[in-house]
Image (cartoon, helix red, strand yellow):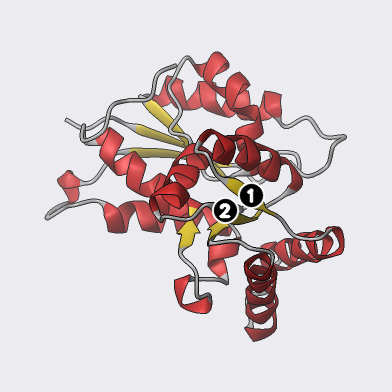
């Protein structure tokens, strides 16, 4: 029997649904019963992770504890930035966490790249810098004005804007990272893959949400060890 996966979601809702679709698509299944039981808290009321005055940690911890109470064996967070609160989430729930940022960083290393460009929020970039350094890799980031443009674009996507203009703007930001020396691009915000894909850039494209979904399948089906607490 597979492990029960608990997903902290809603940050934002569309990105969580995208993650769940990838989880379903990546599961080797011939019938309903072959899929992973997944408990999902889609909670859009989690305080904005990008506002330094907000304190989302306690809300995320409460969500994690409730998922354990509902029967989850292992957790995943469908948001890169929320991984800044991974410690409080695991401590409060007592459950192991399948790390999205660690998985994406390892995937970037496996692509053969030496420097990865990351499209992510300020707090996500801090985490990626640490994880990529542990892989012996450098990180390329956007110039400050372009990082501001990226954040504005993310909020456009959260409002449901995914048209050609938004897609072109995200591709242009990825091109900035390429020009800065990136050898792979990490979609380090779960809204990014809603408007950008591997066909839009000429470098290896690492979708952190897809990497996480793949690891969740492997862990829950016993094909990969459960992460240590």
Q: Which residue is mark 2?
A: 115
On screen, 50 above or below 98?
below
> How many angstroms separate mark 1 from mark 2 (CA)?
5 Å
On screen, 7 above or below 62?
below
Residue found at the far left of this picture: 30
Q: Which residue is mark 1?
A: 139
x and y percent of residue 174 in the render? 63, 69
Viewer-proximal residue, 167 or 140? Answer: 140
On screen, 155 above or below 82?
below
The circle drawn on residue 130 is none
Q: Secondary structure at mark 1?
A: strand
Image point (51%, 18%), residue name: 93
Viewer-proximal residue, 140 or 40? Answer: 140
Image point (47%, 14%), residue name: 94
Q: From this viewpoint, is residue 14 visible?
A: yes
- Which quadrant is home to the N terminus? top left
Residue found at the far bottom of this picture: 164
x and y percent of residue 79 in the render? 58, 45
Viewer-proximal residue, 157 or 177? Answer: 177
Image point (58%, 37%), residue name: 133
Q: From this viewpoint, is residue 10 visible?
A: no
Check disc 2: other Cα within 10 Å, few if <14, some if 14-19, many if 20+: many
x and y percent of residue 33 in the render? 16, 45
Check disc 1: other Cα within 10 Å, few if <14, some if 14-19, many if 20+: many
């Amino acid at each position: 029997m597979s492990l029960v996966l608990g997903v902290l979601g809603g940050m934002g809702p569309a990105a969580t649904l995208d993650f769940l679709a990838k989880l379903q698509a990546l599961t080797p299944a011939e019938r309903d019963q072959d899929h992973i039981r997944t408990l999902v808290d889609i909670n859009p009321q989690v305080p904005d992770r990008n506002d330094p005055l907000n304190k989302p940690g306690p809300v995320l911890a409460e969500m994690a504890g409730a998922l354990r109470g509902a029967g989850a064996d292992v957790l995943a967070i469908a948001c890169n930035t929320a991984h800044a609160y991974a410690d409080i989430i695991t401590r409060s729930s007592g459950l192991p966490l399948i790390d999205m940022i660690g998985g994406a960083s390892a995937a970037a290393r496996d692509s053969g790249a030496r420097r990865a460009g990351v499209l992510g929020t300020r707090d996500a970039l801090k985490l990626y810098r640490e994880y990529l350094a542990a892989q012996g890799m450098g990180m390329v980031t956007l110039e400050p004005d372009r990082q501001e443009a990226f954040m504005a674009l993310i909020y456009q996507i959260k409002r449901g804007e995914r048209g050609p203009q938004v897609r072109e703007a995200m591709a242009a930001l990825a091109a900035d990272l390429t020009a800065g020396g990136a050898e792979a691009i990490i979609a380090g915000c779960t809204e990014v893959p809603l408007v950008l894909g591997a066909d839009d850039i000429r470098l290896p494209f690492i979708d952190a949400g897809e990497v996480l979904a793949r690891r969740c399948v492997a862990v829950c089906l016993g094909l990969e060890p459960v992460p240590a607490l």
